[in-house]
Image: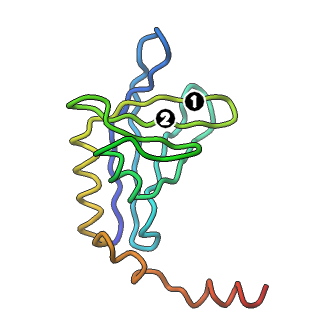
Amino acid sequence: MDKLTTRLPMRLLAGGETPLHLKVECHYSAADPFAVHINFGCVGGLHETVWVASRELLMAGLKAPTGHGDLLIGPWDHAYSYMALTGDTGTALLHIRTRELTDFLAATAQIVAVGAESARIDWEPWIGDVLSA
């Protein structure tokens, strides 16, 4: 198996309003071993939204707040972690069950072991592009 797609439930917190429950698809592929593609689909009539996060960042965020720029992740309480995504229109705060994110990340490690990512990348085409530029 070189790919993994898992649906993870998340809650979008919107101030004092009732949280919006989302079924988010997380994609991992041995062809892009450093990244997790987080597909939020069509939310609130908006276009499909896909965020790309470092697998290493997501793993670190299970233990302590981490990240910079447009993606922050960290523990919320004993059962949940949070993701804060910042874009042009503001910041979205999401809750995700820590156990479900942990299980997804453990499954990615069955595809490409943590620390073995660079061995899975075909560097030749990339180096050729850089040298020909």
Distance of label 1 from label 2 (alpha carbons):
7 Å
Residue carrying label 2? 84
Of the image marks 1 and 2, the number of the one nearer the N terminus: 2
Q: Residue at x 42, y 69 (%)?
A: 33
Q: Nearer the viewer, residue 41 or 71?
A: 71
Q: Position of residue 118 (x, y in %)?
A: 43, 79
Rendered position, 92 above or below 25? above
Q: Is residue 130 above or below residue 48?
A: below
Q: Quadrant of the N terminus?
A: bottom left
In the rendered image, which residue does mark 1 sit on? 91
**At numbered mark 1, what does the secondary structure look like: helix, strand or loop?**
strand
Residue drawn where x is 48% and y is 53% of the image: 53
Label 2 secondary element: strand
Q: Which mark is residue 107?
A: none
Q: Is 81 placed left or right of 54 in the picture? A: left
The crowd level at tag 1 (other Cα within 10 Å; few <14, some 14-19, many 20+) is: some
In the rendered image, the residue lying farthest to the top is 16
Give residue 12's position: percent from left, percent from top.
44, 26
Q: Nearer the viewer, residue 41 or 50?
A: 50
Q: Tell me if mark 2 has few (under 14), some (14-19) or many (20+) residues whose alpha carbon lies within 10 angstroms of its own.
A: some
Left/right placement of residue 45 relative to residue 4 reads right
Query: How many badges with numbers are in the image?
Result: 2
Q: Residue flagged by tag 1: what amino acid is it? A: Thr
Answer with the quarter of the image where residue 31 lies: bottom left
48 or 68, which lies in front? 68
Name the quadrant containing residue 109.
bottom left
Image position, residue 13 (x, y; %): 44, 21
Res 87 → quadrant: top right
Q: Mark 1–mark 2 contact, CB under 8 Å? A: yes
The residue drawn where x is 46% and y is 81% is 121
Quadrant holding the C terminus = bottom right
Q: Where is 71 relative to 52, above or below?
A: above
